[in-house]
């Protein structure tokens, strides 16, 4: 009986370890974080993660082997998506744990943001109230596909690469709060720098869509 119990436990924890092995790579974690924004082709994932197509494919195969992602082929392109929202919840929980226990996370973030004016995070409670009252413009600067997959209610979609061409669509008499994929996404940081340089009163919100959802706020999809 004791031997049977030990074999059972060994087998179970071996399966649990498959998840740990799959997420032991920084790039695989980044790929999962990107897929939390919505499904993507291998080509786009490789570009966003700053790796070669071959490396992206290898990493995605590992994640697929652990049942964290699944794929579908359409013509010449292979599209990946998360197998379940629970995968994104897991990635978020891991990030929060790292922020809480690893002082290096805060140190790296502080060094990167040092001297960047206007990039202090906006108070969440205050932001929600100002959005409800129509006193701020909430700007989603992620690619449009990610906006359509899920965004903060009332947000305006202007991808970062189109921002300078569409500045005339934004009011100068209101505060603009930009957000992207979360606290370690640089799209909103770059957007705020552009906006402030052009005379807008702009701030960054650290929360991304997954943070917003995790805090119990609604997320909408489509236009």
Image: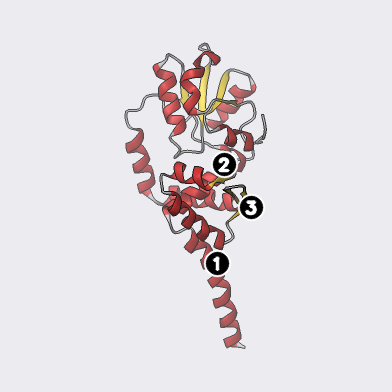
- Give the quarter of the image for residue 64: bottom right
Q: Which mark is residue 84?
A: 3
Q: Is 210 above or below relative to 64?
A: above
Rendered location of residue 115, percent (x, y): 32, 28
Check the picture and name the quadrant holding the C terminus: top right
Rendered location of residue 186, percent (x, y): 43, 35
Residues at marks 3 and 2 touching, judged by CB atoms closer than 8 Å: no
The reply to whether residue 97 is in sight is no
Residues at marks 1 and 3 touching, judged by CB atoms closer than 8 Å: no
Estimate the spatial distance between the alpha carbons at disc 3 and disc 2, rounded to whole Å: 13 Å
Q: Which of marks 2 and 1 precedes in the sequence? A: 1
Rendered location of residue 78, percent (x, y): 57, 49
Secondary structure at badge 1 equals helix
Q: Which of marks 3 and 1 precedes in the sequence? A: 1
Q: Which mark is residue 37?
A: 2
Q: Which mark is residue 16?
A: 1
- Give the quarter of the image for residue 8: bottom right
Secondary structure at badge 3 equals loop
Nearer the observer, disc 1 or disc 2?
2
Q: Is 34 above or below relative to 4?
A: above
Task: Look at 47% across and 48% down and name the residue there.
Answer: 30
């Amino acid at each position: 009986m004791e031997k049977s119990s030990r074999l059972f436990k060994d087998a179970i924890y071996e399966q649990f370890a498959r998840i740990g092995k799959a997420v032991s790579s920084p790039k695989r974690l980044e790929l999962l974080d990107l897929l939390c924004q919505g499904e993507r082709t291998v080509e786009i994932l490789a570009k966003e993660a700053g790796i070669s197509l071959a490396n992206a494919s290898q990493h995605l195969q590992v994640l697929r082997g652990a049942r964290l992602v699944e794929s579908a082929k359409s013509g010449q392109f292979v599209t990946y998506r998360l197998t379940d929202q629970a995968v994104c919840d897991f990635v978020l929980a891991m990030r929060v744990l790292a922020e809480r226990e690893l002082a290096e996370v805060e140190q790296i973030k502080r060094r990167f943001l040092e001297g960047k004016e206007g990039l202090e995070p906006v108070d969440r409670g205050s932001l929600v109230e100002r959005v409800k009252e129509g006193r701020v413009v909430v700007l989603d600067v992620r690619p449009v596909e990610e906006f359509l997959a899920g965004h903060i209610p009332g947000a305006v979609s202007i991808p970062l690469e189109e921002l300078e061409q569409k500045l005339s669509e934004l009011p100068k008499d209101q505060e603009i709060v930009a957000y992207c994929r979360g606290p370690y996404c640089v799209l909103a940081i770059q957007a705020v720098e552009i906006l402030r340089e052009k005379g807008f009163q702009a701030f960054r919100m650290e929360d991304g869509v997954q943070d917003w959802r995790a805090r119990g706020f609604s997320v909408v999809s489509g236009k």
